[in-house]
Amino acid sequence: MSRTTSESPVRDTIPDADVVIVGAGFGGLYAHYRLRQLGLTLKGFEAAAGVGGTWWWNAYPGARCDVESLDYCYSFSEELLAEWEWSERFATQPEILRYANHVADRFDLRRDILFDTRITACNFDDDTDRWTVETDTGKRVSACFIVAASGCLSAPILPDIPRIESFAGPVHYTSAWPHEGVELSGKRVGFIGTGSSGIQAIPIVAEQAGHLTVFQRTPNFSLPAKNGPVPEPKRALIGPDYPAYARSNKHTPAGYHVAMPEELPDIWTPGRSALDATPEEREAIWNALWESGGTGFTGSYIDLTINPESNRLVSEFVHSKIREIVDDPETADRLCPTDHPFASKRLCLDTDYFATFNRANVSLVDIKATPIERITADSVEAGGVSHPIDILVLATGFDAVSGSMLKINPKGRGGHPLADKWGDRFDTYLGMMIAGYPNLFMIHGPGAPGVLFTMPLGGERHTAWIANCIRHLDETGLGAIEPTEEAEAAWDREITSMAERTLYMRTNSWYTGANVPGKPRQFLAHLQGSKYFDRINAIADEGFVDGFVSEERRSVDASV
Ligand code: FAD
Ligand code: NAP
C-alpha cells in the first residue's frame, strides 16, 4: 500500500515482520543470524551503505581495535574461528570491515537488510501490541519486536566551536571518514580531539600532512599498543583449541584473557594491591607490561581504579614515560593528564602518539589554557594566535550509549516518547529493556557492560538472551513483555553503587555522560562483566519473571 499527501513523502509499506533489527554492526549482524534460526521473519535497517557499524563509519587513518583481534571477533562459529586469520595483534579498520563483510556473506546476513536507510520513528500500538517503524526513505513496517543494535558509540557529537561554520576548507569527522580517503599531503591540518580516535589518527595524519596543529583540550592516558604479529605468550595461552579458548572468554571479567609477558619479573603475582609492592617491584612490573603493550598493564595490580593512592602511583609512572618519550619538556608537561585518574576514562592504545610531538611538522596548542576564540575561513584562532589551516579534522566523540536510541526516540505505551522518560535518568532493566516500551530489546543499552566487556561477545550474549525471551513468549502464549519501574529503579541503584566504589565517577568522560553539554550525569555501564551475563541468564532460566510483567498475546503472531 502506498499513499501520497502534500506533507508526507510516499509511504512505502513493506510486509510485516516478526522482528525489526536496527543496525548492521557486530550486534545487528549476529541478531540476524541468531533470530533467523528461530524461524522468525526479520527486517533490518542500516543507515550506512554497508555492514560493519563502527568499522564502516570510523574509516579514519590509524583506526584499529584496542582489544586483541583474536578476542575482538565473534565466537559463535567454530568454522569462522578456524578459517579467519588476523594479520596483526590489533587489526586495522579495513581488516575488521573485511571480516564483517566476510561474516555477512558467509552466513547470508544481508538478505533482510535495507542499507542507506535510517529509522526515524518507532511507535508502539497499545491495542495490537505491535510496533510501527518508519524510515527516512519513507518505508513503513509493522513488527512484534524491535532489536535495537544501534550502537553505543554511533551518535557523533557536533561540537560547539565558535564560528566553525566560517571555515572555508573541508571539515572531516573521524566518525564519518570518507571511504575514498582524504588527501592530506602537503596540507596544513588542524586536529581537534585527543581521545582514543584522535590518539590513533594523529601519528598517521602527521606522517601525511605538511603541518599538523593539534588543538588539545584535555590530555589522555595512553599505553603503547606494540602492535605486530600475535605475541608468543598469547599464542601459548590460546593453545591448540582456539574455539575452546574463545568460548572460555565469556567467563572472564572483561570478555578476554590477558597473556602476561614471559619476561614479567618473578615477583609478580596476580591479585595484589600496588601498595603491597616495593617501588622497585612496581617499576619493574610496569616497565615489563609497558614494553609488552596492550591493556594487560591494567592487570598489574587489582586496585588501580579503586584506590586513589595506587592510582596516583601508576599515573606518575605513565607521566614519567611521556616525559621520557617527548623531547620538549613543556610539550611533555602539556601531554601529561593530571585532571583525571588513570583508567577512569577508556584507556587509549597508541602507536607512537607521544613521539609524534617530536616531529618538526607537528605543534600542540593547549586550548584549555588558550581557548579557541574563533574559526576563520583559513585559520583557528586561539589565545590571540592565528594558526593557518587548510583542513580541519574533528575527533570530538559521541553522545554515547543513550544517543543512538534517543535519535530514534521511540514512543512506547500511551505514545510516551523515550526522550521524556530519559530526560533525567537513562532508566533500563538489565541494560536491555525499558518499562513502558514492551518487546523493545537493546543490545549494549545503558546499564549493560558495553565497552567494559568485549563487545562482539557481549552482543552475542545479549542476542542469545533476546532469542530465549522471544521463544519463551511463544511457548507460553504471551504477547508482550516489559520490565517494571521498580526493577529499573533497583537496577539503577545497583549500577550507581558499584560505580561509586570506583574512580570512574570522579571523571568527566563519556562514561558519565559529562562529554555532552546538558546530558544527565550517570554512570552508564554495569561493572561486573561476566557476572552480569550470568545474572541475566539466571533471570531467563527462571522464566523471565524477576522484574518483568508480561501479558497475554493479542495480535502477536511470531511463530518460533
Ligand atoms: P555499531 O557498530 O555502532 O553499529 C550500530 C549501527 O547501527 C551503525 O552502523 C549505525 O549506522 C546503525 N544505526 C544506528 N541508528 C540507526 C537508525 N536509527 N537507523 C538505521 N541504522 C542505525 N569496542 C571494543 O570492545 N573494542 C575495540 O577495540 C573497540 N574499538 C572501537 C573503535 C572505535 C573507533 C569506536 C567508535 C568504537 C570502538 N569500540 C570498540 C566500540 C564498538 O562500537 C563496538 O565494539 C562494536 O563495534 C559495537 O557494535 P554494535 O553493532 O553494537 O554497534
Ligand atoms: P572521546 O574519547 O570522547 O574524545 C573526544 C575528544 O574530543 C576529547 O579529547 C575531547 O576533549 C575533545 N572535544 C570534544 N568536544 C570538544 C570541543 N568542543 N572543543 C575541543 N575539544 C573537544 O571520543 P573518541 O576519541 O572518539 O573515543 C570514544 C570511544 O570510542 C573511546 O573511549 C573508545 O571506547 C572507542 N574508541 C576506541 C578506539 C580503539 O582504540 N579501538 C578508537 C576510537 C574510539 P575533552 O576530553 O576535554 O572533552
Image (tube, rainbow, N blue to C red):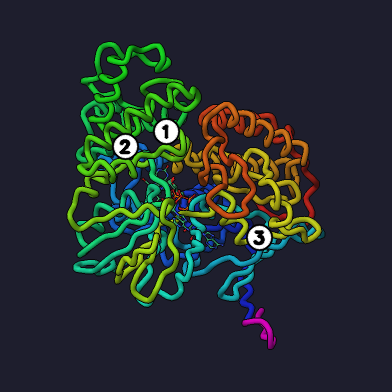
Tell me which numbered mark, 2 or 1, is placed earlier along the sequence: 2
Mark closer to the observer (2, 1): 1
**Residue 457 showing in the rendered view:** no
- The residue carrying pointer 1 sits among few (fewer than 14), some (14 to 19) or many (20 or more) residues within 10 Å by Cα, namely many
Q: Is residue 279 magenta?
A: no
Q: Alpha carbon of mark 3 to alpha carbon of mark 2: how far?
A: 37 Å
Mark closer to the observer (3, 2): 2
Q: Label 2: which residue?
A: 223
> What amino acid is found at the position of numbered circle 1 in the picture?
Phe
The kind of secondary structure the magenta stretch mainly shows is: loop
Mark closer to the observer (3, 1): 1
Q: Is residue 448 or residue 124 the one in the foreground?
A: 448
Say whether residue 244 is left or right of residue 127: left
- Could you tell me residue 78's position as x and y percent? 36, 38
- The number of callouts visible is 3
Q: For the point 29% across and 71% down, which residue is it?
A: 390
Does the Cβ of the disc 1 residue fall within 8 Å of ligand 2? no
* Dot 2: element: strand
**Residue 118 showing in the rendered view:** yes
- Could you tell me residue 541's position as x and y percent? 64, 30
Does the Cβ of the disc 3 residue fall within 8 Å of ligand 1? no
Q: Is residue 403 or residue 458 the one in the foreground?
A: 403
Q: Is residue 375 or residue 148 the one in the foreground?
A: 375
The label shown at residue 409 is 3
* Dot 1: element: loop
Q: Quadrant of the N terminus?
A: bottom right
Q: Label 1: which residue?
A: 342
Q: Is residue 164 or residue 298 the one in the foreground?
A: 164
